[in-house]
Image: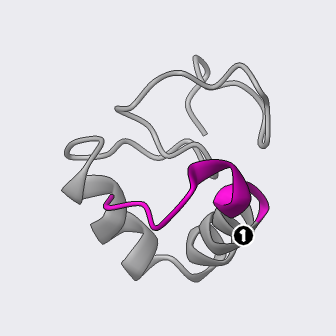
Amino acid sequence: MSESHPPRDDADWDNPDLCPFCGAPLTDGGAGFMDHVDEHDTCRERFEAWLENIRDDMGGEWGG
């Protein structure tokens, strides 16, 4: 994990260049994040749990 990355599940995460779930560097914060999530089971599970938690706040589907 990157030293500049906050602890896992930290509400202060704000760096789109790093995965918020594991701290790995991303090629970009959009498609690169989705590629990362598709390739890493733990991050995918954590993303799906996060998405489920905020789904009601979004008022529809998130386009990524």
Quarter where residue 6 is shown:
top right
The one of 51 and 25 positioned closer to us in this rendering: 51
Q: In this view, does 16 lie to the left or right of 4?
A: left
- The number of discs equals 1
- Judge from the rendering whether residue 4 lies leftward or rightward of residue 37; answer left or right: right
Q: Where does label 1 land, which residue?
A: 52
Q: What is the quadrant of the C terminus in the image?
A: bottom left
Q: Give the range drawn in magenta.
A: 53-64
Q: What residue type is labelled 1?
A: Glu
Residue farthest along the front direction in this orientation: 59
Task: Residue 43: give x, y in percent of width and height.
Answer: 59, 67
Q: Residue at x 69, y 67 (%)?
A: 46
- Is the residue marked by circle 1 packed among few (<14), some (14-19), or many (20+) residues within 10 Å? few
SS at circle 1? helix
Quadrant in the picture for residue 59: bottom right
Colouring used for the render:
one colour
Q: Provide residue 3's location: percent of width, then percent of height.
A: 61, 21
Quadrant location of the N terminus? top right
User: What's the residue at 30%, 41% (across, down)?
Assistant: 29
Q: Position of residue 42 (x, y in %)?
A: 65, 75
Asked whether residue 61 is drawn in magenta, I would say yes
Which quarter of the picture shows residue 53?
Answer: bottom right
Side of 6 where 28 appears, left or right: left
Q: Which residue is drawn at 49% across and 76% down?
A: 40
